Image: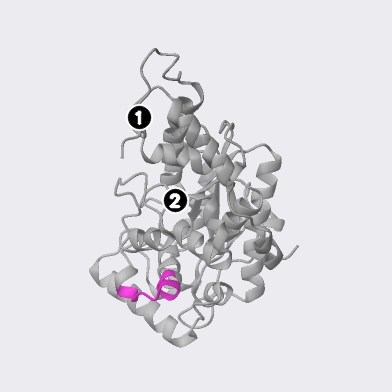
Amino acid sequence: MNIEEICERIEPADASAMEEAEKRWLTVGKPLFSLGKLEDAVKRIAGIKGTSDYRLDKKALVIMCADNGVVEEGVTQTGQEVTAIVAGNFTRDMTSVCMMSKVAGVDIYPVDIGIAVDVPGLTKSGQKAAYGTRNFAKEPAMTEEEVRKAIEIGIGMVRELKEQGYEILATGEMGIGNTTTSSAVASVLLGERAEDITGKGAGLDSKGLEKKITVIRKAIEKHRPDPDNVTDVLAKVGGLDIAGLTGVFLGGAVYRVPVVIDGLISSVAALCAVRMAKKARDYMLPSHVSNEPGGQTILRALGFTPFLTCGMFLGEGSGAVALMPLLDMALKVYREMGTFEDISVDKYEILK
C-alpha cells in the first residue's frame, strides 16, 4: 500500500467514543471540568482508540536520527559527528530523554533513518533511507524516492509497535542541523519569513543565527519548493528525520494509535502529515511548546495549545515524554475515581 492509499484510509476519530468519555467525566466525583486539558486529552484518546474504556500501560518513544548536509554551511555550533555519538548513546541509556523515559515508563526506540555513518547496535538496513541528506544550500536535500522511503519507514514503525502492544507513542529526533531544516520546511508550508520562524537551535550566537536565516532564505529562493506539495518541500529543504516522523504521525492515524508531538522538529513533521491527510490531526496530541521562535506558530497552525510551557528546547522527545505522567494521572482519575453517588456528594450541575 503506497502513501496516498494510506492517507485515504484515515478516518475521523470516533465521536461516539468521545461522547461516552465525556459522560464518564461528568459522573466523576470532583468539580466539573476541573482537570482542564487533561480531561480533553482523555476524551481525545478515546476517539482515537474508538472506545471510552482503554489503558495506556505500554508506551514507546520513536526517535528518528538523521544527518543534514546543510551543516556544511556552518549553521550549527557542533559538527555532524555528534549525531552518531548521541544516537549511539540512546542504545546505552546515556541521554537526557533516557533518564526521563525511565521515570515516565516509556520504552525507547531510536531509528537510524539517515545518519551519515552506520552506528553499531542501532543501524538496521531496512530502517535506513539514506546516509544523510545533501546540502540544500547547493542542491535539493533529497530525492522524492528518499522522502517517500523515510515516510514509509515511519508508518512501518507504528505498525510494528502496535503489533507489540504499545498503546501510545511519543515522537523524538536527533540530528545536528535539524532546526535549520525544520525552520525551512515550516517557512515554506506556513508562508512565514525565515527570520520570523528560525531560532538559535543548540547554541548559536546572534551572528550564527543571521547566517542560518540567510542560508534558509537563499535555499528557498533557489529551489522554490511547492507549498502545496509536502513531498516536494521535504525533498528540497527538509530532512530524513522530519520525513520519518511524518510517517509516524500518518501511521498513528491509520492504525489508530495516539501520537504525541514533541518540539519544533516533531511539530513540523506533524504539520507535514496534516497537510498530506487533514484527518491525521485527530490522532495527535501536543505536549510542550518549543522555545524556538517557530514553536508557537506551528502549534497554532495545527490548532493546538500546549499542555506544558517549560521553555524547553532539548529535543530527543523530552517534551513528549514529560507529558506521559500527566496522562497517566488523568486516566487514573477517569478510570478509578468514585462517582458523586459513591462519595455521597450531590452531583455538580453544568451552569450556563
- Image quadrant in which you'd find residue 6: bottom right
Residue 119 is at least partly visible in this image: no
Position of residue 231 measured from the top left corner of the image (x, y, whole percent): 58, 73
Q: Nearer the viewer, mark 2 or mark 1?
A: 1
Callout 1 crowding tier (Cα within 10 Å): few <14, some 14–19, many ≥20? few
Which residue is located at x 72 percent, y 65 percent? 2
Vertical arrangement, residue 204 with respect to residue 316, above or below = below
Query: How is the model colour-coded?
Result: one colour
Is the residue 93 above or below the residue 138 in the image?
above
Categorize mark 2 by other alpha carbons within 10 Å: few (<14), some (14-19), many (20+).
Answer: many
**Where residue 217 appears, x then y in whole percent?**
37, 80
The mark found on residue 220 in the picture is none
Q: Secondary structure at mark 2?
A: loop
Residue that badge 2 annotates: 262
Where the C terminus falls, by quadrant?
top left
The picture places residue 258, in percent across and down from the top left corner, at 56, 45
Name the one closer to the observer, 111 or 308: 308
- Report the magenta residues as a range: 186-195
Residue at the right extreme, as displayed: 1
Mark 2 and mark 1 lie on one chain; the one further toward the N terminus is 2
Position of 1 with respect to 304 (left or right) is: right
Q: Residue 140 location in percent, x, y?
A: 54, 80
Report the predominant secondary structure element of the magenta stretch.
Answer: helix
Q: Which residue is mark 1?
A: 349
Q: Is residue 203 visible?
A: yes
Q: Amino acid at mark 2?
A: Asp
